[in-house]
Image (tube, rainbow, N blue to C red):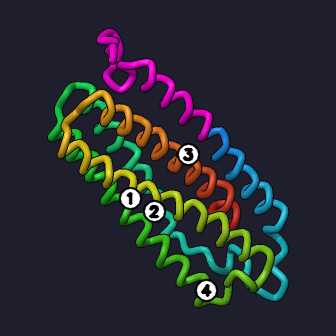
Amino acid sequence: MKIDHSQPLEYGTEQNKMNILGFWIFLGAEIMLFGTLFASYFTLENRIGSGPSGADIFEITPIIIETFLLLTSSFTIGLAIHAMRLGRQKAMLTFFGITLVLGLAFLSVEIYEFFHYVHVGAGLQTSAFSAILLTTLGTHGAHVTFGLLWGLGIILQIKKRGLTVETTNKSFIFSLYWHFLDVVWIFIFSFIYLKGLM
């Protein structure tokens, strides 16, 4: 395997470059998925039937906490990749671990939020609005859950093998995924929560 030392290690081989390109293409498909969910939400947001509206069920405190946790985790995964490029494995793993803890905390608040919505009468079968709301939030939450498991697997691989061409490539691709989830959350925060609270 020929390694290009003029590039960061995660781009060090042709295979690694192709992996990153392939993941960007995958993220394009994910954009289409979330784009479809947002388009459906905007179509159905006023179809509340006899159920509650967003203004009735949204609580500002959990929304602010979720946003803070996820945006902070985007910063810490950036620090992890920076430490990785400097060859500082311990710092990289620390920031990677902090990212996953923040993601887990985010998921915990989101699960609380789901219970709250169902408790106040906004379940999947209540109205078109509540169904698309829970579907959109649930899809994002499922992606975060997958990210937590994936990130844990990467940490275990780095502890076992160190910072290699393969583990740095996987870590960098994971960081792209995590940043993508943060961007999606910004859209959820802006166009679902803030709009719904107004």
Q: Position of residue 74 (x, y in %)?
A: 41, 45
C-alpha distance separating marks 1 and 2: 7 Å
Specify few, some or many for label 3: CA neighbours under 10 Å numbering under 14, 14-19, or 20 or more: some
From the viewer's side, name the closer residue of 86 and 52.
86
- The answer to which image quadrant residue 57 occupies is bottom right
In the rendered image, which residue does mark 1 sit on? 149
Q: Position of residue 198 (x, y in %)?
A: 69, 65
In the rendered image, which residue does mark 4 sit on? 118
Does the image show residue 61?
A: no
From the viewer's side, name the closer residue of 46 and 23.
23
Residue 105 forms part of the magenta stretch: no
In the rendered image, which residue does mark 3 sit on? 183
The relative height of residue 161 versus residue 121 in the rendered view (above or below) is above
Q: Position of residue 117 (x, y in %)?
A: 60, 82
In the image, what residue type sits under mark 2? Thr
C-alpha distance separating marks 4 and 2: 21 Å
- The answer to which image quadrant residue 15 occupies is top left
C-alpha distance separating marks 4 and 3: 26 Å
Q: What SS does tag 1 mark?
A: helix
The tag earlier along the polypeptide, 4 or 1, is: 4
Mark 1 vs mark 3, foreground winner is: 1
In the rendered image, which residue does mark 2 sit on? 145
29 left or right of 141 in image = right
From the viewer's side, name the closer residue of 7 and 130.
7
Magenta residues, start to end: 1-26
